[in-house]
Amino acid sequence: MFLSQDSVRPLIGIPCQGNVRSRYRRFSVGQSYCRALQIAGGTPVLLPLLDDKTVLDVYERLDGLLLAGGGDIAPRQFGEARSPGLRRVDLPRDRVELLLTRRAVEDNLPLLAICRGIQVLNVALGGTLYQDIGRQISQALRHDFAPEYPRNYLGHEVGINPGTRLMQILQASRLDVNSFHRQSVKRVAPDLLVTATAPDGVIEAIEMPEQRFVIGVQWHPEELIEDDLGMRRLFQAFVEEAARPGRH
């Protein structure tokens, strides 16, 4: 059951993306993430890509952290050279998200990572990425359906591993998901457990069993909550955990 209107709504931080293609500099977050958190009973708090002290001052007031989708992560963050297929990166966003992810895990703060977010989570904890699935994984399915298809287009199936928290929340072993990514998890960080894969072996979800709530998914559940009860339950479980006391 979603939190009632009378409940204290937990504050969920969402690091912004920086506008690196315009002379007018701005910080922004996709509206769907904010609406999904609101529907689940949370209050979204947008985190600008400012200096570490300012970012951490805001972070200390949060009850949960959501890592949103976006552009490529700079390969320097996981010790690799740039591949030919890499697109524009946002170094300030990399810095802020990696800082906050490591702090959230250290503090046992509930964390939901989506698309780029699952990749940030893996890199923050010592994993690596495929910089371009099409170039680096032979016989890979199509994983980037942008911009030809709507955001709720179900591009391929994923299999959910039994006994995982993700399967407990979604209550399904297989499901169709939307897909708008070119990068994906390669070497999984030591503390992370793979919880879902696509038919071509691409990792689609990870989690940290020892934490209160740390789940990363490669698809975009925020675009599916109107029609998919499992995606609504995912946001609900995240927000409900954030509403409970328990940092450290």
Image (spheres, helix red, strand yellow):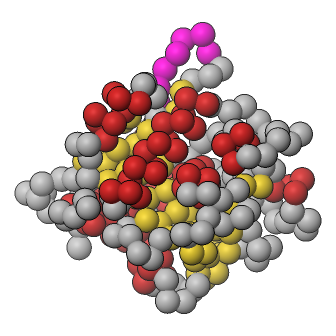
Q: Which of the pair 236/204 is nearer the observer?
A: 204
Task: Name the quarter where the C terminus is drawn.
Answer: bottom left
**Does residue 155 appear in the picture of this structure?**
no
**Does residue 186 appear in the picture of this structure?**
yes
Q: Which of the pair 59/106 is nearer the observer?
A: 106
Q: Is residue 214 left or right of residue 17?
A: left
The region drawn magenta spans 22-28
Q: Is residue 27 left or right of residue 237?
A: right
**Magenta segment includes 23:** yes
In percent of width and height, residue 245 lies at: 18, 63
Q: Which of the pair 222/154 is nearer the observer?
A: 222
| Residue at the image position 42 percent from the left and 25 percent from the top | 51
| Residue at the image position 82 percent from the left and 39 percent from the top | 82
In percent of width and height, residue 33 lies at: 43, 48
Task: Name the quarter where the N terminus is drawn.
Answer: bottom left
Farthest-out residue, bottom: 162
Q: Is residue 100 left or right of residue 154?
A: left
| Residue at the image position 70 percent from the left and 56 percent from the top | 128
Residue 195 in the image: above or below residue 105:
below
**Magenta segment includes 107:** no
In percent of width and height, residue 165 lies at: 44, 79
Report how many numbered discs are placed on residues in the image: 0
Farthest-out residue, top: 23
Magenta region, main secondary structure: loop
| Residue at the image position 25 percent from the left and 66 percent from the top | 240
Q: Is residue 173 left or right of residue 54?
A: right
